[in-house]
Image (spheres, grey):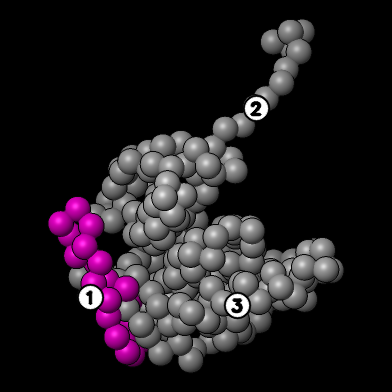
Amino acid sequence: MKYIGYFVFLVAFIVIFVPVTILGGVGEGIKLPVILNKFPIVTNNNVKEIAKIDSNIKVKMFDVKNNKVIELDLEDYVAGVVSAEMPVSFNIEALKAQAIAARTFVIANMISLGGSGCNKHQGVDVCSDVHCQAWISKEERLKLWDANSALENWNKIMEAVESTKGLVITYNGEIAKHIKYHSTSGGKTEDSRYVFGYQEPYLVSVESPYEEVAPNYITTVVMSKKSL
């Protein structure tokens, strides 16, 4: 039950509260694509929403590795982000949460919707680097996995993306502008105003239980006496 609670918490945590590891500006007055449905979420007596949008839109991305601008269908872009940002071995519910967070981030940055785009590469919505969100092509991702499990792994990524198709996070009826995520917070997150100098009601300090099962919760460094 403890592990089930961990993943349930992770879903809510990663898409609503998580402080920031992604950099990049988001402009004011961001338009939301056509909303198909809304799903209220109540946390700490505050109501947020997961909204389902028409995701038949294109993302303009600067491919850092190949030094060129490419256009991708939104959901294809999200699949590339999920496969780059989170290990495929993670629970499917965690991958779904990652997909929603990634989709929200890019929608909030899209120039055509009023976002400011990638502030490192002019004229594009995002780049493929961690400056925005890490992204990897399907072909490259498959090559990096073991051949015996590569197709099964990709199908798991696509399950996470397709089962959350069009889902984004909104706050007060608008796209959540500063959706950020990280892998581990050491048991408690920090308020965004103390890290990035701005405040959002959904980026406040909260307890983060169950992290002791996360891969990077504890790290060990061995040093010689001489190096000290």
Of circles 3 and 1, the one toward us is 3
Q: What element carries label 2?
A: loop
- Taking depth in this image into account, of 156 and 175 the one nearest to the observer is 156
> In terms of image quadrants, where is residue 32?
bottom left
Determine which residue is flagged by label 3.
Answer: 158
- Taking depth in this image into account, of 71 and 155 the one nearest to the observer is 155
Whichever of callouts 1 and 2 sits on the residue coming sooner in the sequence is 1
Of circles 1 and 2, the one toward us is 2
Determine which residue is flagged by label 2.
Answer: 220
Measured from the top left, where is residue 161 in percent x and y?
53, 76
Judge whether residue 107 is colored magenta. Answer: no
Number of numbered labels in the structure image: 3
Measured from the top left, where is residue 174 in percent x and y?
27, 74
**Which label sits on residue 36?**
none
**For mark 1, does the 10 Å Cα neighbourhood hold few (<14), some (14 to 19), or many (20 or more) residues?**
few
| 81 on left or right of 211 | right
In this picture, is 221 found above or below 185? Answer: above
| 62 on left or right of 103 | right
Residue at image point 48% right, 64% down: 93
Cα distance, mark 1 to mark 2?
44 Å
- Taking depth in this image into account, of 131 and 185 the one nearest to the observer is 185
In this picture, is 140 found above or below 207? Answer: below
Residue at image point 64% right, 58% down: 89
Determine which residue is flagged by label 1.
Answer: 173
Q: What element carries label 1?
A: loop
Residue at image point 38% right, 43% down: 208
Name the residue type under label 1: Gly
Residue 130 in sight: yes
In this picture, is 220 found above or below 167? Answer: above
Cα distance, mark 3 to mark 1?
28 Å
| 16 on left or right of 225 | left
